[in-house]
Image (cartoon, grey):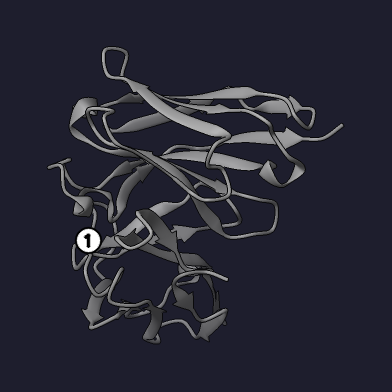
């Protein structure tokens, strides 16, 4: 059981906007910035968002937000190359540990 | 350009030991906390351990506490993970990851990663 909760799967068509969510509690998401990581075909993870900031080289169709204890990753204008597994993570001060979500499999139809 | 290169993975018998290394370049290594994250076959990402920029603070997942030791040599820009008493459930690809913010001594220094290595496979089997 992951400390952060993500949808198991999400799908969308090319050009559509999709939002992935990551729900935690006041000890983790409610207190810290969240990172989002893309993993294609079990290759090395790549950071696509941290807090509300976009890493260099990541398309601006990716955006991030947070409300209370839920963080969201939105992809506007979905592209075939966005099909991947997406994970969220942050620090949990009650556990003194980094916590991950179970991951969301994004399928581009 | 930030680069993280893991090495040291391989096949080891249950109860055995292995030491992983992560050679870092392209940034001021001692200024950032570092973590090890693993992924078992067909499973999601699991955080294993973290260490502060100075090496003075370390943190472990309950699943590895007492068996694994994280360390770093800032003079060599290298992160290590000493793994003892290995179990079949430790079989995974192990990634090193760089914290996304300069280590200020506060816990938010560990809240997200910005760069990852390519990973090294550890297989625990007889």
Q: Residues within 10 Å of mark 1 (few under 14, many from 20)?
A: some
Residue A76, relative to residue B95: is it above or below? below
Residue farthest top in this picture: B75
Quadrant where the N terminus of chain B is found in the figure: top left
| Residue A20, image quadrant | bottom left
> Seen in the image, is B61 located left or right of residue B89?
left
Residue A17, relative to residue A52: is it above or below? below
> Seen in the image, is A34 located left or right of residue A84?
left
Residue B101, relative to residue B121: is it above or below? below
Quadrant where the C terminus of chain B is found in the figure: top right
> Dot 1 lies on which element?
loop
> How far across and how far down the image is residue A13, in percent?
49, 85
> Seen in the image, is A55 located left or right of residue B61?
left
Residue drawn at 33 percent across, 61 percent down: A90
| Residue A27, image quadrant | bottom left
Q: Nearer the viewer, residue A4 or A17?
A: A4
> How far across and how far down the image is residue A29, in percent?
29, 72
Residue drawn at 41 percent across, 52 percent down: A46
> Where does label 1 land, which residue?
A54
> Seen in the image, is B101 located left or right of residue B87?
left
């Amino acid at each position: 059981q992951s400390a952060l909760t993500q949808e198991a799967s999400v799908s969308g068509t090319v050009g559509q906007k999709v939002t992935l969510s990551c729900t935690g509690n006041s000890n983790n998401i409610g207190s810290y910035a969240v990172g989002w990581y893309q993993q294609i075909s079990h290759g090395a993870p790549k950071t696509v968002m941290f807090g509300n900031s976009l890493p260099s080289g990541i398309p601006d169709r990716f955006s991030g937000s947070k409300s209370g204890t839920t963080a969201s990753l939105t992809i506007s204008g979905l592209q075939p190359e966005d099909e991947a597994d997406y994970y969220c993570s942050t620090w949990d001060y009650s556990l003194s540990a980094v916590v991950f979500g179970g991951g969301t499999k994004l399928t581009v139809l | 350009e930030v680069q993280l290169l893991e090495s040291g993975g391989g096949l080891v018998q249950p109860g055995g030991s292995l030491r992983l290394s992560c050679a870092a370049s392209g940034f001021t290594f001692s200024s950032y906390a570092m973590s090890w994250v693993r992924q078992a076959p067909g499973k999601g990402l699991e955080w294993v351990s973290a260490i502060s920029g100075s090496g003075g603070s370390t943190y472990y997942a309950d699943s590895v506490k007492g068996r694994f030791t994280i360390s770093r040599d800032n003079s060599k820009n290298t992160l290590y993970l000493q793994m003892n008493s290995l179990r079949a459930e430790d079989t995974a690809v192990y990634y090193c990851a760089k914290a996304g913010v300069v280590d200020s001594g506060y816990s938010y220094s560990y809240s997200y990663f910005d760069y990852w290595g390519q990973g090294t496979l550890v297989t625990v089997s007889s």
